[in-house]
Image (cartoon, rainbow, N blue to C red):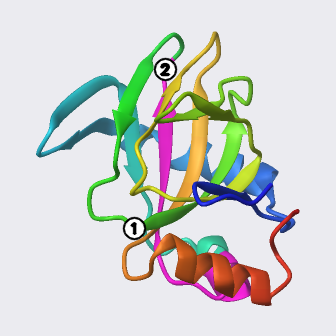
Amino acid sequence: MVTDLIADINYPFDTELLLMHFDTVCCNRVKYEDHRGVIKDWNIIRVNHFKYSKKICNDLGVTGEPRFYELLPHTVLPLHKDHNTQCSINVLLSGGDAPICFEGDKYYKYKSCLLNTQADHGVTNGDQPRILFKISIKDKSYDHVKKILDSHGLLSN
């Protein structure tokens, strides 16, 4: 699936390695906070010097900042646009039953995707923690990164 909101990525993400790394850094989780406030059941873990994230960026032809997000069970992440991120590479590590929602009641389930973070999006989480590995891309638009991924044959139709 490829739209102006979300594009599935065909890349062999090592989700076991990502989950193992999450387990080693999860003690550094903090509540997500920006100029809009705090969402109490949404945690962020910024990760620096993570070699595997550098490999992913190199393979995909992008640069970005890696992080993990943890949305606790039964938490609603309301529609929002990401702050200081034009688009992102998202890899869902757990909680795959909770689809992402875009304004206009468009719902999508994904395992890994390029996400247009400047379109209003949110999640209503289910019974399990939703753990996400994300590479925040700050310097290129969704359309630009979509063209890069397409030129590498990394988008699923």
- Which residue bears the numbered disc 2? 72
Q: Position of residue 58 (x, y in %)?
A: 66, 88
In magenta segment, residue 137: no
Q: Which mark is nearer the camera, 1 or 2? A: 1
Question: For the point 38% across and 43% down, which residue is it?
Answer: 44
Query: Do the residues under discs 1 and 2 have CB atoms within 8 angstroms?
Result: no
Q: Residues within 10 Å of mark 1 (few under 14, many from 20)?
A: many
Q: Quadrant of the C terminus?
A: bottom right
Q: Amino acid at mark 2?
A: Leu
| 16 to the left or right of 3 | right
- Badge 2 marks a residue whose secondary structure is loop
Quadrant housing residue 109? top right
- Badge number at residue 86: 1
| 4 to the left or right of 33 | right
**Front residue of this view, candidates 51 and 86:** 86
Task: Give the residues in magenta.
Answer: 54-72
